[in-house]
Amino acid sequence: MSIELSVKLIRPTKMADILTEAECRLSGVPHGPFRLMEPVVDPSDLLLGPSRWEDDALISDGRVAKVGLWVMYHRRLDELQPRGREPTDAERRAIEEMAGYWAMIDAGVLRTRASFCLAALIACGIASRNRSRILDESNRLQQGQWADPDALSAVFARFKDADSFEEFADAFCDEVDFARDWPSARADLAERKVRLN
């Protein structure tokens, strides 16, 4: 099962700004900083934008959430190979809407509920910076195929009184009915602490 969210990239943005944007949606919820694990560079030096990207990135909360991030390019209609028939108007519109560079956020790295929440926060931050929407083909965010970052921010705001990122992630995942049969983020953290001791 793929757990991906996508955002069309319109303008270059420093990774540090994207991480800050994501953390802002946590309001006063206590949490460790979201950090770039790979590539090992200062997030201020890494530019995410409408251009080819050499590396995938790994972003983590340092505890129970980790997501992958990469850039993908969808070709324009004039860049596609002819298929023997002319596309319909609906096909043309769909191709043109998807054409360009996209940030792909994969919450399946650890396959935890906290990772899905982190992916949603990162996608929301990128979408806000790009004045774009979040493509959620599986409707996991319960916002339709195209999620508006402002509407998603309003969902995040409901949990601003959570005592930890893990509690915030569990509340968010419960709200959007994501993977209720998976261990909670709080249970993941408790298990991790046991393994470290």
Image (spheres, rainbow, N blue to C red):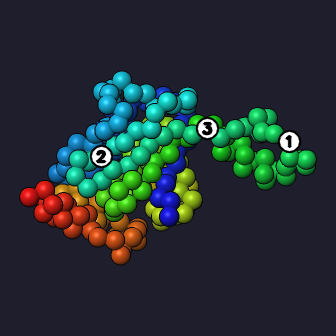
Compare marks 3 and 2 and give the one earlier in the sequence.
Answer: 2
Q: Residue at x 31, y 38 (%)?
A: 37
> At which x and y percent is residue 186?
21, 65
Q: Which residue bears the numbered disc 3? A: 73
Compare marks 1 and 3 and give the one earlier in the sequence.
Answer: 3
Amino acid found under the numbered disc labelled 2: Ser
Disc 1 element: loop
In the displayed structure image, the side of residue 151 where residue 185 appears, left or right: left
- Position of residue 169 relative to residue 93, above or below, is below
Disc 3 element: strand
Disc 2 element: strand
Q: Residue at x 57, y 40 (%)?
A: 72
Q: Are the residues flagged by discs 1 and 3 in contact, CB closer than 8 Å?
A: no
Q: Quick check: can you spot residue 177?
A: yes
Q: Which residue bears the numbered disc 1? A: 82
- Position of residue 80 relative to residue 160, above or below, is above
Task: Assess disc 1: are there few (<14), some (14-19) or many (≥20) residues with their C-alpha within 10 Å of its C-alpha.
Answer: few
In the displayed structure image, the side of residue 180 where residue 97 appears, left or right: right
> At which x and y percent is residue 142?
48, 65
Of the pair 175 and 44, the residue shown nearer to us? 44
Amino acid found under the numbered disc labelled 3: Tyr
- Position of residue 80 relative to residue 110, above or below, is above
State the residue lying farthest toward the top.
45
Q: Residue at x 49, y 52 (%)?
A: 5
Q: Which residue bears the numbered disc 2? A: 60
